[in-house]
Amino acid sequence: MPHRAPPNPSRYLVEWYRPGLTHELLQQTAHKIGRSAGELSAEGSMVELLLALFVPDDEVAFCLFAANSQASVTQVCQRAEIPFHRIAEAISTPPQVVKAAPSNGDVSHGGEEPPSYFDLKK
């Protein structure tokens, strides 16, 4: 059974340009990358494909990985024959679900909303 990445591994975003990439080709590419990640994990490197995304208007594709090292992600892409443009360490957070505030102005978690990055830049 392949090793899964540890609970808090680093995240890496891979970017490559692929004119004409279709939904079907993205699925095939993600499968190929996922298979390469599984093989590398079975060999002892902790790496997992989390997401594959294509932006058709920009002809650019991205993959988000959880891995112990950028070298592992590079190796996965090379094995999958993905001609990536760059790999960068990324920061991620789980999505925050916030319920609509009641009419009295209280927020769902019982206090003031924490400032966002954009609030801090003011």
Image (cartoon, rainbow, N blue to C red):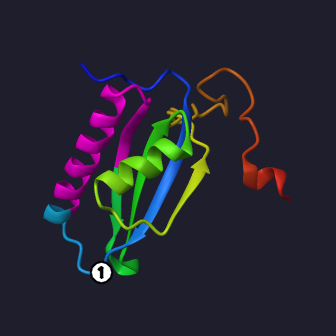
Name the residue at 52% across, 46% down. Answer: 71
- Amino acid of disc 1: Pro
Q: In the image, residue 98 lies at what x, y percent? A: 53, 33
Name the residue at 28% across, 34% down. Answer: 38
Q: Secondary structure at mark 1?
A: loop
Q: Quadrant location of the N terminus?
A: top left
Depicted 70 relative to depicted 58: above or below: above
Q: Nearer the viewer, residue 70 or 27?
A: 70
Number of numbered discs on residues:
1
Q: Quadrant of residue 59?
A: bottom left
Q: Quadrant of residue 22?
A: bottom left
72 horizontally vs 115: left or right: left
93 horizontally vs 66: left or right: right
Q: What is the magenta range?
A: 26-51
97 horizontally vs 17: left or right: right
The residue furthest right is 122
Q: In the image, residue 118 lies at what x, y percent? A: 74, 55
The residue furthest left is 24
- Which residue was labeled with disc 1? 19
Q: Quadrant of residue 54?
A: bottom left
Name the residue at 59% across, 48% down. Answer: 90
Depicted 32 relative to depicted 7: above or below: below
Q: In the image, residue 107 lies at what x, y percent? A: 64, 30
- Magenta stretch, main secondary structure class: helix
Q: Residues within 10 Å of mark 1 (few under 14, many from 20)?
A: few
Q: Quadrant location of the C terminus?
A: bottom right
Q: Nearer the viewer, residue 86 or 98?
A: 86
Whether the magenta-drawn stretch holds residue 48 is answered as yes
Depicted 55 relative to depicted 74: above or below: below
The residue furthest front is 43
